[in-house]
Image (cartoon, rainbow, N blue to C red):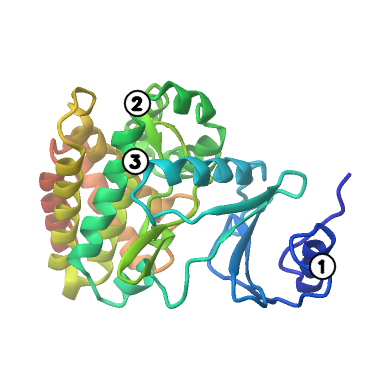
Amino acid sequence: MPDALDIEDAPALLAYLQRTGRIASGEQPRIAILQGGVSNRTVWVERESGEAWVLKQALAKLRVPVDWFSSPERIHREALGLEWLARLAPPGSITPLLFEDRERHLLAMQAVPQPHANWKTVLLGGTICADHVRQFATLLAAIHREAHGRADLAEVFGDRAFFESLRLEPYYGYSAQQTPDAAAFLDSLIRETLACRITLVHGDYSPKNVLIHEDRLVLLDHEVIHFGDPAFDLGFSLTHFLSKAHHLPALQGEFASAAREYWRVYAEVLGAPQWAADLEPRAVRHTLACLLARVVGRSPLEYLSPAERLRQRDAVLRIIPSVPATIADLISQFEEQLCQLSSV
């Protein structure tokens, strides 16, 4: 049995790195805990040479108010994601994998160089850069396009257990329990999603998982990557633009425009493959489901106030009975419902 290791314990981590030969026995790197994640311990290590790493160690119980468990084996799915996405995504958009330890459920990747900024923080600060939105769309479309129909990827990423435990159950399943009026819609979407195996799906495609370095986007956090329905990535990511439009009413029009541009560029880069013929209506359904899940599910958006969460829930419940056919119509209806509910 391996020794127990908590990488947030700096002396223990230092001893581990030296003992395993990752660094020299006398080397004294700088070690700092990185905040913000709920599913992993994450630590920054800067070596004496100036080389910087990020180490991640998966938690069995996630750091959220409600009970939420997932096997720490998922860190090795992330390692696979790092290896494969580096081949599929635009150059420089994926951090290189350095090593993984299967016994202690951790991995190390090359750190994104300083200075860098978290895109979620930038957006919440009110800065919306059209080029960043286009890069975000291009990156996702490239992954979906390049991975489509790949039998090797379907085999490597065919197990969707982590996607189910970290996304479908806590987002859709739990939300269905909390919101009976949406239960039939969500239950149907779960079945539809499980039946769909089209291409590689990141599963956590969010501005929170993007760093900006030298005006280029770098994608992080790949632990729920799997072969499935690309519409989930679209719904998950569009939700972040629309929820910020809700949260920052002075910038609602700009965020809504960013969501429209995101979908336009994604569709343009993807092209018009036959497999994507019904992608947009599926993406609409996933966007509605994620908008609801991020206010009533196990992982609510922390920046939304209680009143905003209720308003977002009610807006989605008003739209679900007659689901729009297009992303553009969904964005317009969501804006309209927020306006009506804000005036009540």
Please state which of residues 202 and 311 is positioned toward the viewer in this rendering: 202
Q: Is residue 206 above or below residue 211?
A: above
Secondary element at tag 1: helix
Q: Earlier in the sequence, mark 2 or mark 1?
A: 1
Rendered residue at 62%/46% (across/down): 75
Amino acid bearing label 2: Ile
Q: Earlier in the sequence, mark 1 or mark 3?
A: 1
Please state which of residues 4 and 17 is positioned toward the viewer in this rendering: 17
Rendered residue at 17%/75% (across/down): 250
Q: Are marks 2 and 1 in contact (CB under 8 Å)?
A: no
Mark 2 Cα within 10 Å, few/some/many (few <14, many 20+)?
A: some
The x, y position of residue 74, in whole percent, is 61, 42
Which quadrant of the figure has residue 71? Answer: top right
Please give the residue where the numbered disc 2 appears in the rendered image.
198
Amino acid bearing label 1: Ala
What distance separates the C-alpha of mark 2 from that of mark 1?
Answer: 43 Å
Please give the residue where the numbered disc 1 appears in the rendered image.
12
- Viewport quadrant of the N terminus: top right
Secondary element at tag 3: helix
Q: Is residue 72 above or below residue 281?
A: below
What distance separates the C-alpha of mark 1 from that of mark 3?
Answer: 38 Å
Amino acid bearing label 3: Ile
Please give the residue where the numbered disc 3 appears in the rendered image.
143
